[in-house]
Amino acid sequence: MSQELRIEYLKSIRERYKNSSRSKKSVILDEFCAVCDYSRKYAIAILAGKAEPLAKRPRGRHVLYDGSVVYHLRRLWLDMGQMGSTKFRAALPEWIPFDEAMGHPEAVEIREKILKVSRAQIDRILNPFRGDPVHGLSATRPGHKRIKNQIPIQAKDFNITKPGEQVQADTVAHCGDSLSGVFANSLTVTDIDSTWTENRALWGKSSARVIEAMRDIEAKLPFVLQGFKSDSGSEFMNYELMAYFRERTQENVVKMTRSRPYKKDDNCYVEQKNFTHVREIFGYARINDPELVHRMNEIYVEYWGPLQNYFVPSQKILRKTRIGAHLKKEYEPAKTPYQRLLDSPHLPEERKELLRRSKVGLNPFQLQKMLQKKLGEFEEELRKRNTGVNAA
């Protein structure tokens, strides 16, 4: 029964209750308790005029994040590239000042609630909108044994504390469901200390293409490259790339190391970027037209790289503690690569100033919008070319 009906019912029986005998009062009271679901003592006080009926509160906790908060949280999550909850929560303060909807005066309360939402609550809200991940093929081919013997193995990277002290590199094959023929590849290079990441698309993965991409990446890095680590794939284990890193002045020689065969954990920093920085935007389709490589590089350099390095936070593990059979992991607060570089005491101040200048004028929502537009155009062009090939 609604609160309005309860009040009307009370008005109709209260006077009759006061003027009734003791036995009739008992009957009226029994009926009132059964109809309104009140306790007997509370019902007596109401009928005697000593208390007024209160509206029943719904059971459970008060709903803090209502439909409007859920709507804007989901909208922001989609506009920000569907980040994981930890990264998404850390990125919200950086992105929200650029969001037009959150800039209106009537959105102040919603904005405050969104900035206070916890990581666990974000997961509860967004879980219904998430899909299942997919996986691709491995295109790594071992390099020549004689070359590998000249490049030392470095299993783990625990003591990297300076930007550029060591980067990890890997390639991702855009081969679809077949490794035959020539197709596009993506070279991913990520700095261990700052997590700054650069991507370049290659047609095939010859040593000449890899060196050309590395030369372009080095020119864009906000720090001096000192160490380079890769797997034992033939695109890295070759004399040309060795010479590229070694034939420099003594101060600029890059130390080249490699991971153990079949041990992806040795290159864990770049392995995870292969998914977040390559597969999440270009997927698993086969790209077998060299003319599309230029478009891929435009997306990587003009939109994807600035977005990820300046506005998308990442987490780094601080320590692991084994407690019986359980492995407890502790992480540092999520930060963007840009923030890590500015916080680093090992990066010269002039390079930090260049970083600050390069960020001026960047709007994450505009970058994301242009990224989605370029990706849409790329996918349409890829579909047309693949359809043309199949038709032929």
Image (cartoon, rainbow, N blue to C red):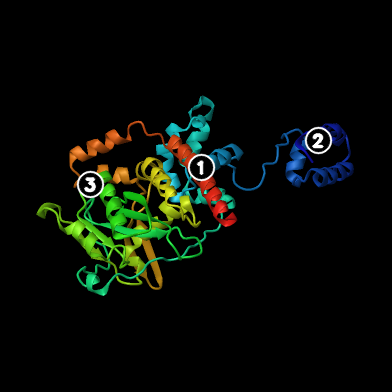
| Disc 2: which residue | 5
Is 147 on the left-hand or right-hand side of 81? Answer: left
Mark closer to the chain start, 2 or 1: 2
The single residue placed furthest to the left in the displayed view is 250
Taking the spot 43% from the left edge, 32% from the top edge, the residue there is 97
In the image shown, does 27 or 251 lie closer to the viewer? 251
Q: Position of residue 375 (x, y in %)?
A: 49, 44
Mark in the foreground, 2 or 3? 3
Q: CA distance from mark 3 to mark 1?
A: 33 Å
Of pointers 2 and 3, the one earlier in the residue sequence? 2
**Residue 383 percent coordinates (x, y):** 55, 50
Task: Give the residue type that dot 2 points to.
Answer: Leu
Q: What's the mark number on residue 50?
A: none
Q: Which amino acid type is marked by label 1?
A: Glu
Density class for disc 1 (Cα within 10 Å; few <14, some 14-19, many ≥20) is few
What residue did someone put label 3 on?
A: 223
Residue type, numbered disc 3: Phe
Pair 3/1: label in front: 1
For mark 1, give the secondary structure.
Answer: helix
The spot of residue 98 in percent (x, y) is 44, 32
